[in-house]
Image (spheres, helix red, strand yellow):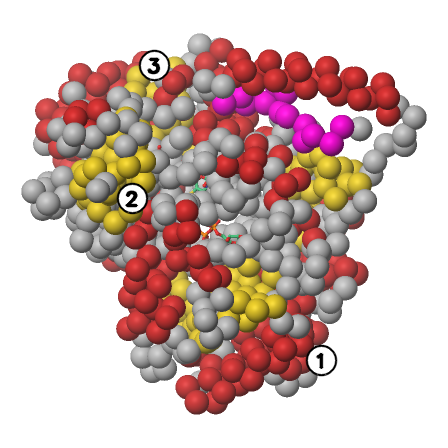
Amino acid sequence: MPVLPAPNFNGPCLPNQSLSYRRFSILYSLLTVHFSLFTIHRPPLPTVTTACPRNCYSTCGLRVTVEDGRLRQIEPVPENRATDHGACLKGLSYVERVHSPHRLLYPLRRNLSGGFDRISWDLALGTIAERLRAIREEHGPKSLLYYSSSGTKGLLNGVGASFWKLFGGYTTTYGDLCWPAGLEATRLTLGSNEHNAPWDLANAKLIIMWGKNAAETNIHQMTFVDQALQRGAKLVVIDPRRTETAERASLLIQPRPGTDAAIALAVGHELISKKWIDRAFIAAHVHGYDAYVDQVLGCTSQWASQVSGVPKEQIKQLAELIASSAPVTICAGFGMQRYTNSGQTMRAMMALLAITGNIGKPGAGWIFANLRTQVFGEKDPIAFYPPHAPDPLVRVSISTAMLGPQILSTQDPPIKAIWVERGNPIPQNPETPTVIAAFRSVDFRVVVEEVMTDTAREADIVLPAKTFFEQTDVIGAYWHDYLQLRAKVIEPPGEVKPESEIYWLLAERLGISKAEAERHIPTPNDAAVESWLNRRLAHLPGVTLERLREGPIRMPDEHELAFADLTFSTPSGKIELDSSDATSLWSVDRLPSYQEPVESARTGDLSRFPLHLLTPNTKNRIHSQFGHLEMLKAIEPGPVLQMHPADAQCRNIRSGNRIRVFNERGELTVPVRLDRGIRPGCVALHNGWWLQDGGAVNVLSKARETDMGHGAAFHENLVEVEAAK
Ligand SMILES: Nc1nc2c(c(=O)[nH]1)N[C@H]1C(S)=C(S)[C@@H](COP(=O)(O)OP(=O)(O)OC[C@H]3O[C@@H](n4cnc5c(=O)[nH]c(N)nc54)[C@H](O)[C@@H]3O)O[C@H]1N2
Ligand SMILES: Nc1nc2c(c(=O)[nH]1)N[C@H]1C(S)=C(S)[C@@H](COP(=O)(O)OP(=O)(O)OC[C@H]3O[C@@H](n4cnc5c(=O)[nH]c(N)nc54)[C@H](O)[C@@H]3O)O[C@H]1N2
Ligand SMILES: [Mo]
């Protein structure tokens, strides 16, 4: 058998690369046949079906070939219909990632010169237990901050919170870096976060990719976009950048960042004034329509054009397309969801579907997040409601978006110890310099990590983390609704221990009784982990590890359409354009409205910082993961700022020059790439680069919340760019 990872033959080829990609595929098939002829006598290598737990829409099934304890090949799992073409390049790169020389294999302790020394588990756990006991005694258990983020999905992630309660209590964060403004806007409007099955998109006649770059962030969705286009559908993309997704669109609208609500309200105005609405649907299923009509009365396309910088003809064209195509699906991404007006923007976008009757039908609806697999009762990872304590032992008091400033300001008790797991907050949370200052202000820091990230570098003790191939778990998703087994495939390398085992061993050292620990933490062996998981699955009829081993299961019952019965779990039981909760919970207008972002080209000091910095995702990483691998460095070797030639010319900057991008919060020096595809006045740099790579974008961002849900307004970020000296 060949040892190359299998490419994704018929998969959602990346636009622009499809030709060379196909050539490569043919070459690869020939090689495979050639090798197979010589290896045919060998028995087939064992394969295990598992699933990728990254914080990514696709959540692919993976069929893994193992030889001598090493991953050799990653192939598709056809039973997962949403991802049956197989993994992306990052998924294939696990053959490198898992065995990479960058992996941490032993506990490490910071030494006096700021470097790290390898230590034994015994010493590591002994030191941690001693420091935690002392801090607990002096300041109380809530002086410990347990910070976990989106590094991996899995039910076993919940063991951490259970352990810290056994410790006596802890402090944790609320809100989330990712999606809470959109989740809350959807909950206020539709009552719950669910959407049609991924493949239903092929039935749409108009697809609006609004602030979503699916060709990079949800590549499997593009298969269904392609199917719809082949059946005559149209694609509209709304994004300040001409993205890979936009290459397939018939209309690209490039708004000034943070102004999408103005466009949506003007489209609503246009639809109403031309009577392009579904009166019967509105009468039966929409609450607050008359108030909405009043709200959009003054929102002409002329007004929206002035606000958004989009020609008014394009706004009218969008209204016409919505009116003349049925069914319509809006795929709402996270672009316009990272501003101080995000929740209201998302509500304004959803209203367009409500007034045209595009909900609860095949090919129609709102695709943001599908939480149908969240069947385990916990809100993790979305603690997005106003801070509340679910348990007297837990202090939920630090906003994730304001992690740095609020660690520093917390009192009674102050934060004295931090435990970080599955997160890389130094480059990924807003206001990196304040996050660093906060970490340095704390007496004792433990980071559980696979690799030496910027956050691990700040730790006193670094513990080596498992990869998902090294412990069985069960995972859900947020685009399709499959529950999947994340099966163990290999033993952990070196001295790596899964988190559940670390907690088990620490419980012993902290004097927690074995009986008490056993109630919450699986004992460190595979059989105990499996029976712990089976206990967690017990409330789901027919769902067991045995059943999951046969393949993914759709949850909670297979259904293709969201809201098909047109009942909505909102206070009125209808789709709410007028929401009293919007005002009482978040102090925003009851109706969707446009509010100028706090930091924007209209509110900021343009004489100092005239450019708007966007920090989107890239197909080559999941946030701060994968960037260190050779397979991905070959494609994206380092951070590069994208800039419009007109903005470069007046600053005497040429393509390839090193530039300094800066504001009053920080600065980065990186090469520039000139590109007519980005809206003039905007520059873009992918998030996820580390400080160590020289590209950590959050040195420039401000710790600031979205209007609802306690999300992070990452994209409100004015900067200036100049040639580097
Ligand atoms: N390959 C890959 N896939 C991923 C991830 C990853 O890191 N890499 N991350 C996963 C996660 S956690 C998330 S949250 C999702 C994110 O998925 P997406 O939402 O698709 O990705 P983003 O890059 O955050 O934002 C999408 C687009 O919004 C645009 N944008 C920025 N500001 C505005 C605005 O004001 N208005 C409009 N209309 N557009 C704007 C950006 O230019 C960008 O192209 O992807 C998931 N999938
Ligand atoms: N400027 C800007 N910043 C952003 C964004 C943006 O658009 N712009 N996007 C935001 C969004 S949407 C998100 S979701 C966040 C993501 O930010 P984070 O949630 O911090 O996620 P990652 O960057 O993926 O880092 C996760 C870390 O977990 C580690 N890890 C993986 N698996 C395991 C495991 O099994 N155990 C342990 N202990 N560790 C593990 C990985 O090695 C990695 O270092 O970033 C946010 N930051
Ligand atoms: Mo995210």
Residue type, mark 3 in image = Ser
Which residue is the site of mark 1? 515
Residue at screen point 33% across, 57% down: 432
Looking at the rendered structure, the secondary structure element under dot 3 is loop
Q: Which residues are magenta?
A: 2-14
Q: Residues within 10 Å of mark 3 (few under 14, many from 20)?
A: few
Q: Give the x, y percent position of residue 238.
A: 30, 27
Quadrant where the N terminus is found in the figure? top right
Decide: is 130 above or below 699: below
Q: Which residue is mark 3?
A: 250
Are dots 3 and 1 in contact, CB under 8 Å?
A: no
Q: Nearer the viewer, mark 1 or mark 2?
A: 2
| Residue 598 percent coordinates (x, y) | 17, 49
Residue 296 in the image: x percent, y percent? 16, 33
Q: Is residue 180 visible?
A: no
Q: Report whether residue 665 is seen.
A: yes
| Residue type, numbered disc 2 | Thr
- Magenta-colored stretch includes residue 11: yes
- Residue 366 percent across, percent down from the top left: 40, 33
Seen at 33% across and 47% down, the residue is 697
Q: CA distance from mark 3 to mark 1?
A: 63 Å
Identify the mark at residue 156; answer none if there is no mark: none
Q: Is mark 2 within 8 Å of ligand 2?
A: no
Query: Dominant secondary structure of the magenta stretch?
Result: loop
Q: Which residue is mark 2?
A: 669
Which residue is outermost to the right?
A: 41
Depth order, front residue of 249/611 = 611
**Image-based side of 580 in relation to 607, left or right:** right
